[in-house]
Image (spheres, rainbow, N blue to C red):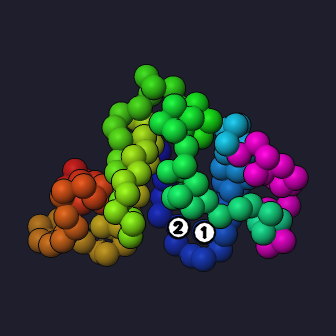
Amino acid sequence: MPLPVPKTPKDIEDIQRQRLPLAVAQAMKAPFYKDRLAGVDLNKLDDPAEWAKIPILEKEDLRALSPESFMSDFNLAPQSEIMEYWRSGGATGQPLFYPRTFEDMKYMFLAFQRGIVCARVKKRDSIHISFPLGIHPIGHMYARV
């Protein structure tokens, strides 16, 4: 870190080609994904047919887990690495709390800083960020950047 902002669509494709197998391999370590990702070939992730083997994760799948199961079967980070919990209510209004590690937060700050760079904000520019600061993580992240 810091990671440069990709300049071209090819740069984005190259990053995805390198990082997506790592992300899927990491997910495969979670008991929650053991059966869901069985049969996915990490060497073929450029093939849309291989991506089709990866099920879409719905918030309801996570809400169905007990807090203990969420932490032991879905979450890979030990409690000592968790910096904070974020909340997402979604359209249902049923909250879903999910942990963010110290390492996650480094990348979240970087992502939000990139958003400001991509908007071409310069020193001494004033910007209005209208995301709420209540329960929405995006508002908190922009307030911290």
Task: Name the disc covering residue 131, or none.
Answer: none
Percent coordinates x, y for residue 2 in the rendering: 44, 49
Q: Nearer the viewer, residue 108 or 51?
A: 51
**In the depicted structure, whether residue 145 falls above or below residue 1:** below
**In the depicted structure, whether residue 143 falls above or below residue 7:** above
Mark 1 to mark 2: distance in Å? Answer: 6 Å
- Is disc 1 in contact with disc 2, using a CB cutoff of under 8 Å? yes
Residue at x 77%, y 66% (from the top left corner):
51
Residue at x 48%, y 36% (from the top left corner):
67
**Kind of element beneath mark 2:** loop
**Left or right of 26: which side holds 81?**
left
Neighbours of disc 1 within 10 Å: few (<14), some (14-19), many (20+): few
**Residue 112 visible somewhere in the drawing:** no
Percent coordinates x, y for residue 127 in the rendering: 16, 72
Task: Name the disc covering residue 12, or none.
Answer: 1
Q: Does residue 84 show up magenta in the picture?
A: no
Residue type at mark 1 is Ile
Per the image, the residue denoted by label 2 is 6
**Left or right of 1: which side holds 115?**
left
**Residue 65 visible somewhere in the drawing:** yes
Locate residue 43: give its quadrant: bottom right
Residue type at mark 2 is Pro
> Over which residues does the magenta segment extend?
33-49
Locate residue 114: give its quadrant: bottom left
Locate residue 99: give its quadrant: top left
**Kind of element beneath mark 1:** helix
Neighbours of disc 2 within 10 Å: few (<14), some (14-19), many (20+): few
Residue at x 74%, y 61% (from the top left corner):
54
**In the depicted structure, whether residue 59 falls above or below residue 71:** below
